Amino acid sequence: MSDEAVPAEARAEVALAVRDALAEHGYERLTTAKIAEQYPKSEAGLYYYYDAKDEMIAAFLEFAVGRFGEELDGIEAADPEARLRAACERMFLSPGEEGADLHVAVMELLSHAPHNETLREPLVALQSAKLDVLAETVREGVEAGVFRPVDPEATAAFLLAAGDGSTGIHVALGMDVGDDLRTGWSSYVDGLLAD
C-alpha cells in the first residue's frame, strides 16, 4: 500500500512505534516484532499497511521531516540568534538526553542509505528539511542585521554536518567531548554575529 493510502492516524502510530523501537534497538537489531511491541495495535496491523521493516522506517522518516521545523517554530525566541542557538541545542545532544538514542539510530540509517533506496529518499528529505530550517533562520538573521552577511546554505550545511558528527563521537561512542562541542558550536554562532 502506498504511504499516501495509509490513513494519517495509522501513519502516525506506525511512525511513533518505529521511533521508539529504533531508539531502543538501533537499525541492525530492529525487527518488525520489536516495532510491534511499541505499536498500539497488533503486528498484523503493521503488515496491513507496510510490507517490510524498511518501509515502516521510511514512513517514520517521512513523518519526522516536519518535526524539526515544528520544534523550532515552537521555540519562543525573539530573534534568529536565539532560534539558531536552540536548533544547535537540539542537534548537539549528549548521551542520556531525550532524543539522543534516536539521533544515533538516524546516523545508523544514514550509513545504510547508499545501498538502500527505500531509506535513501526519506533520509534525504529529512536532512534537507533540517537544512532548510537552519538556512532560513540564518537568512532571517542576515536580513535583520543580527548575523553578518554569511551564506545561509553553507552555514546550515556546516552546522548540520557538525551536529551529525557530534552524534557519532559524543553520543554513539561516548567520548567525553560534550563541553568542547558546546564551546565549539557556541563560538561558531558567536562568529556569525554582526559587529
Image (tube, helix red, strand yellow):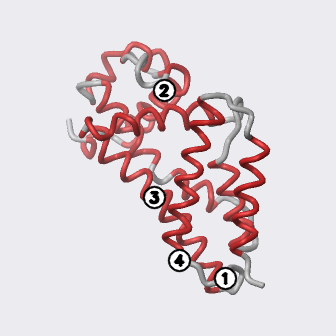
Q: Residue at x 65, y 57 (%)?
A: 87
Relative height, residue 73 to residue 4 (above, below): below
Inter-mark Cα distance, 1 to 2: 40 Å
Q: Quadrant of residue 176?
A: top right
Instruction: Give the secondary structure at mark 1.
Output: loop
Instruction: Give the secondary structure at mark 4.
Output: loop
Write down the residue under mark 4: 151
Q: Residue at x 40, y 20 (%)?
A: 28
Write down the residue under mark 1: 148
Q: Residue at x 61, y 79 (%)?
A: 140
Task: Give yes or no for contact between labels 4 and 2 (Cβ–Cβ under 8 Å).
Answer: no
Task: Give yes or no for contact between labels 3 and 4 (Cβ–Cβ under 8 Å).
Answer: no
Specify the amino acid type for callout 3.
Answer: Ala
Instruction: Give the secondary structure at mark 2.
Output: helix
Q: Residue 10, image x and y in percent?
A: 38, 34
Q: Residue 25, image x and y in percent?
A: 50, 19
Relative height, residue 140 to residue 135 (above, below): below
Write down the residue under mark 3: 129
Q: Residue 112, image x and y in percent?
A: 34, 34
Write down the residue under mark 2: 22
